[in-house]
Amino acid sequence: MEKIVFDDNSQLISKEYTDLFYSNLGLRPSCGTCKYSTYRRISDFTVADYWGIENYNQEFYDNKGISLIMLNSSRAKDLFEYIREECDVIESDVQKCQQPNIIAPSPIPNYRSLYWKELKKYGFKQSLKKFTPFGGVLTKIRKRVFKYTGRWL
């Protein structure tokens, strides 16, 4: 569930966005073939969410999100040493900080293009009900049928 707090302290809580995000339906097709989903990076730094840190360092976990910064070059190591004193830092190893998109591209649902057609035709809420967990058991049935028949009910 996503929560946005505005300057006047009013809030917007949306389960729909979370359902869409985790369904991977909103991803670009190129995310499914990303050549940068590997530990071999061409950048100096990789910045990501450190999912699962609570399994390795409970004291550092704060339930608000911890950033993972990977140093991919000697230049990155030098730059990081320059700013290290300004940060709260713990070192980790590759096995502990493995994130799905560092290891492999995001899986793109085979019904993604159908979702986008329906989104343009029927709008956001209607499409979410039909294609994400927001739609409940019927969505699970539709996904299974699509997997075997190529037809979306």
Image: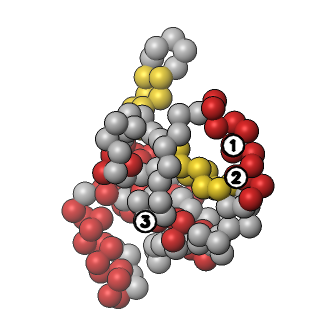
Which residue sits at x=35%, y=83%? 147
The answer for how far apart the CA atoms under marks 2 and 3 are is: 20 Å
Give the structural element (helix, strand or loop) at label 3. loop
What's the colour scheme?
secondary structure
Amino acid type at image mark 3: Gln
Which residue sits at x=42%, y=51%? 51
Label 1 Cα neighbours within 10 Å, binned few <14 / some 14-19 / many ≥20 = few
Q: Do callouts 1 and 2 mark residues in contact (Cβ within 8 Å)?
A: yes
For label 2, the residue is 77
Residue 96: x and y in percent read: 41, 60
User: Quick check: 36 above or below 123?
Assistant: below
User: Nearer the viewer's eye, disc 3 or disc 1?
Assistant: 1
Amino acid type at image mark 1: Glu
Give the structural element (helix, strand or loop) at label 1. helix
Q: Which quadrant does the N terminus fall into?
A: top left
Q: Is tag 3's residue or tag 1's residue first in the polypeptide sequence?
A: 1
Give the structural element (helix, strand or loop) at label 2. helix
Label 3 Cα neighbours within 10 Å, binned few <14 / some 14-19 / many ≥20 = few
For residue 134, side relative to residue 94 (left or right): left
Where residue 81 is drawn, which disc sits there? Answer: 1
For residue 5, side relative to residue 32 (left or right): left
Residue nearest the observer in this picture, 130 or 73: 73
